[in-house]
Image: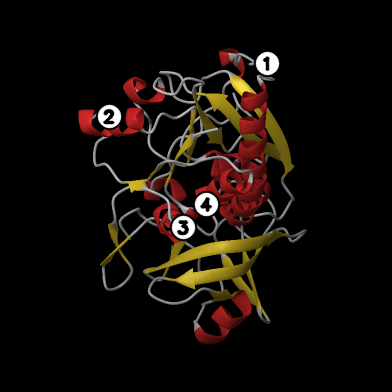
Amino acid sequence: MRVIFMGTPEFAVPSLRAILDAGHDVPLVVSTPDRERGRGLKLSPSAVKAFALERGLDVATPESLKEESFCDRIRSAEPDVICVVAFRILPEMVYTIPRLGSFNLHGSLLPKYRGAAPINWAIINGERETGVTTFFLRKRVDTGTIILQRAISIGPEMTAGELHDVMMDVGALAVRDTLAMIERGAIVPLEQDDAEATPAPKIFREDCAIDWSRSAERLHDFIRGLAPHPGAFTAYAGATIKIYRCQRTDISGIPPGRVEVRGERLLAGTGTKALDVLEVQQQGKRAMTAAEFVRGFRFDQGERFEHASPSA
């Protein structure tokens, strides 16, 4: 089949590779324009564009998806299908062009976790299972008819970054299988039940401040659900500190936010039991283990982590 692929980050690259490996013709790859990246702010292509150019594919990077010239380019490619993975919201004038439709890969078991951050919210909410869904595009975001789903277990210590990497590979297989089903005419589309939908909105910096009055269980999920990006943060003595990993303990009696250093362990009180902080990063420095951190940062016993302001 002739498949136009649309995607931007590294997450989408295995899906494009799977499409090529399955023998489909990819007449066009669509990604975002080059952006300034890194310390030198050099113009750099997206991960998808870089991979597509390596494979000798034609690439478009439109500023607007509604430009008539862009729509003409899609039409001239004569696609059977458009596959979208981690890209922008397509206007109806684009996703209705292919003769067999356009589909998206989403990082949840829809209708649960509709929105921009399904990986993070699944972990933050303490889910033990999530997955990927492919579905045909429709005007309302993430509401189209389901083509297929693949479940993924969430381990009790798994971070959002680790789930992202697992989902990236599972998602590529789902894309491959979806195209095979479309090609065979073997799809039995399933309508989503809006009554079962849950939101997964974009996460902003202000959403990442740690509230130490919450339970250890909820904070454990909150911290790993934001690790490594964008990162849950707190403050101590005016310094902003991100916490990437922690462990639940049976230690009680430490007030919420209070810091206790026991040897090379860094304990923080919550609304219930203490958390054993395992990996941190002080603003402007590299991430390190808590053991490394306590050796180089002075903590006064009895002091507390603060609820840092978003602008800190």
C-alpha distance separating marks 1 and 2: 31 Å
Report the quarter where the N terminus lies: top right
C-alpha distance separating marks 4 and 1: 27 Å
Q: Which marked residue is nearer to the observer: mark 2 or mark 3?
A: 2
Q: Are marks 2 and 3 in contact (CB under 8 Å)?
A: no
In the rendered image, residue 211, in percent from the top left (x then y), is placed at: 50, 50
Judging by the rendered image, the residue that carries numbered circle 1 is: 188
In the rendered image, residue 159, in percent from the top left (x then y), is placed at: 63, 55
Judging by the rendered image, the residue that carries numbered circle 4 is: 13
Q: Residues within 10 Å of mark 2 (few under 14, many from 20)?
A: few
Residue in the image at 70% along x and 55% along y? 273
Q: Earlier in the sequence, mark 3 or mark 1?
A: 3
Task: Inspect the image, locate mark 3, and give the three-letter code of the amino acid beneath it.
Answer: Phe
User: Nearest the camera: 231 or 17?
Assistant: 17
Residue in the image at 44% along x and 53% along y? 52
Direction from residue 173 to residue 297 in the image, left or right: left
Direction from residue 126 to residue 285 in the image, left or right: left
Direction from residue 251 to residue 53 in the image, left or right: left
Please, what secondary structure does the residue beneath circle 2 have? helix
Q: Residues within 10 Å of mark 3 (few under 14, many from 20)?
A: some
Please, what secondary structure does the residue beneath circle 4 have? helix
Considering only vertical position in the picture, is 71 above or below 152?
above
Residue in the image at 55% along x and 45% along y? 120
Q: Are marks 3 and 4 in contact (CB under 8 Å)?
A: yes
